[in-house]
Image: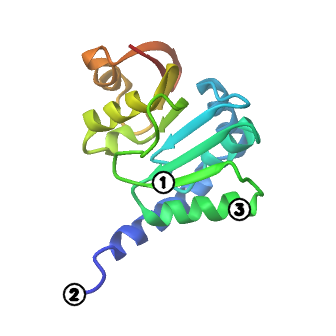
């Protein structure tokens, strides 16, 4: 019958390879700045994939900050850990999960939900978890590349969980409550 996870691992590797041609450093850094990444913050890169935003975010937050990189794929966590080690970054922690972060309540300054919301099966569950881990003054930054931002806003703001703070071209930023 073969390895049931083989297709998922191959799909992830193909996606990571393809993304390497489309994600360029200046675009990544500019998008992170527009999302509000700052020195000393605790950032959660939710659905981090191969870490194209994790590594630049870790550099931006510096040694006084931390970046948690969460993905459903174990191959993603392994790739991010290897990339962080190769870059000499000790402020990156990987998490493998399909929803729950395992982080303490109100422990994160900024959540990056980049090009991921359309592919999340349990959107309400994920948004509940992000609400739980964000600090009261925390920010949820959503980049909608594959999907419709007009549909994303009502989804994220449902139940008064988050409020749209700003729409900056392709980045939606939300505050809690």
Q: Which residue is mark 2?
A: 1
Q: Residues within 10 Å of mark 1 (few under 14, many from 20)?
A: many
Q: Residues within 10 Å of mark 3 (few under 14, many from 20)?
A: few
Q: What's the CA distance linking mark 1 and mark 3?
A: 15 Å
Specify whether 132 is left or right of 169. Answer: left
Q: Which mark is residue 75?
A: none
The residue most toward the bottom is 1
**Residue closest to the eye, 61 or 164:** 61
- Residue 90 visible in the shown view: yes
Q: Nearer the viewer, mark 1 or mark 2?
A: 1
Specify whether 150 is left or right of 35. Answer: left
Q: Which residue is mark 3?
A: 85
Q: Earlier in the sequence, mark 2 or mark 3?
A: 2
For mark 3, give the secondary structure.
Answer: helix
Where residue 10 sits: x, y (%)? 42, 72
At 59% from the left and 50% from the top, the residue drawn is 22
Q: How is the image coloured?
A: rainbow
For mark 2, give the secondary structure.
Answer: loop
The residue most toward the front is 104
**Residue closest to the eye, 8 or 57:** 57
Q: Which residue is mark 1?
A: 95
Specify whether 122 is left or right of 116. Answer: left
């Amino acid at each position: 019958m073969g390895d049931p996870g083989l297709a998922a691992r191959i799909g992830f590797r193909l996606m990571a390879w393809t993304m390497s041609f489309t994600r360029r450093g200046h675009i990544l850094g500019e998008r992170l700045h527009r999302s509000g990444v700052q020195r000393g913050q605790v950032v959660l890169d939710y659905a981090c994939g191969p870490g194209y935003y994790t590594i630049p975010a870790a550099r931006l937050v510096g040694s006084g900050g931390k970046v948690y990189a969460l993905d459903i794929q174990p191959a993603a966590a392994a790739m991010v850990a290897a990339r962080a080690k190769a870059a000499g970054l000790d402020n990156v922690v990987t998490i493998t999960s399909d929803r729950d972060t395992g982080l303490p309540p109100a422990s994160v300054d900024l959540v990056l939900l980049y090009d991921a919301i359309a592919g999340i099966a349990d959107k309400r569950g994920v948004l509940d978890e992000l609400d739980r881990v964000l600090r009261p003054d925390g920010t949820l930054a959503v980049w909608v590349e594959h999907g419709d931002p007009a549909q994303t806003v009502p989804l994220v703001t449902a139940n008064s969980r988050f409020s749209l703070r700003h729409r900056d071209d392709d980045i939606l930023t939300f505050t809690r409550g």
